[in-house]
Image: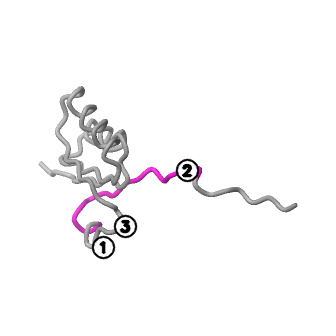
Amino acid sequence: MIVKTVADLGCDCGMLCIGSAMLGAGLCVGFDIDAEALEIFNSNLEDLELMNVVVQCDVSSLPDSVSETFDTVIMNPPFGIRHNMTPS
């Protein structure tokens, strides 16, 4: 049996990480800086009776070697932070 590992960068409430676990990933680790989002993630894990790892940190401070630690690295990019610039 091959155990696949997944890192979810900026996991928020953990939907991508939870989905990965439900699809058979062996270990999912969610990284986020927001403590409130991670509380919701932990609550979701309890409700679904899943075991994932949650890490509170700024993902920009993670070493480059993190990507070599996991089989797959996923993230849902933060939409809406860039203002659309239209010519006047």
Q: Which amino acid is tagged 1?
A: Asp
Q: Which amino acid is tagged 3?
A: Ser
Q: Position of residue 10 (x, y in %)?
A: 38, 53
Residue in the foreground of this view, choosing between 71 and 80: 80
Q: Which mark is residue 64?
A: 1
Q: Which mark is residue 60?
A: 3
| Real-space CA distance between mark 3 and mark 2, rounded to the nearest whole angstrom | 17 Å
Name which residue lies at 12% across and 48% down. Answer: 1
| Real-space CA distance between mark 1 and mark 3, rounded to the nearest whole angstrom | 10 Å
Q: Is residue 27 left or right of residue 8?
A: left
If you read the primary sequence from the N terminus, does the residue marked by circle 3 or circle 2 appear first?
Answer: 3
If you read the primary sequence from the N terminus, does the residue marked by circle 2 or circle 1 appear first?
Answer: 1
Q: Tell me which corner region of the image, top left, top right, bottom left or bottom right, holds residue 9.
A: bottom left
Residue situated furthest left in the rendering: 1
SS assignment at label 2: loop
The magenta region covers 67-80
Of the 4 image quadrants, the one containing the C terminus is bottom right
Name which residue lies at 20% across and 43% down. Answer: 52
Name which residue lies at 33% across and 52% down. Answer: 32
Instruction: Name above or below for residue 37 compared with residue 43.
Output: below
| Real-space CA distance between mark 2 and mark 1, rounded to the nearest whole angstrom | 24 Å
Name which residue lies at 75% across and 60% down. Answer: 85
Q: Which mark is residue 72?
A: none
Residue located beneath label 2 in the image: 79
Does 77 lie within the magenta span?
Answer: yes
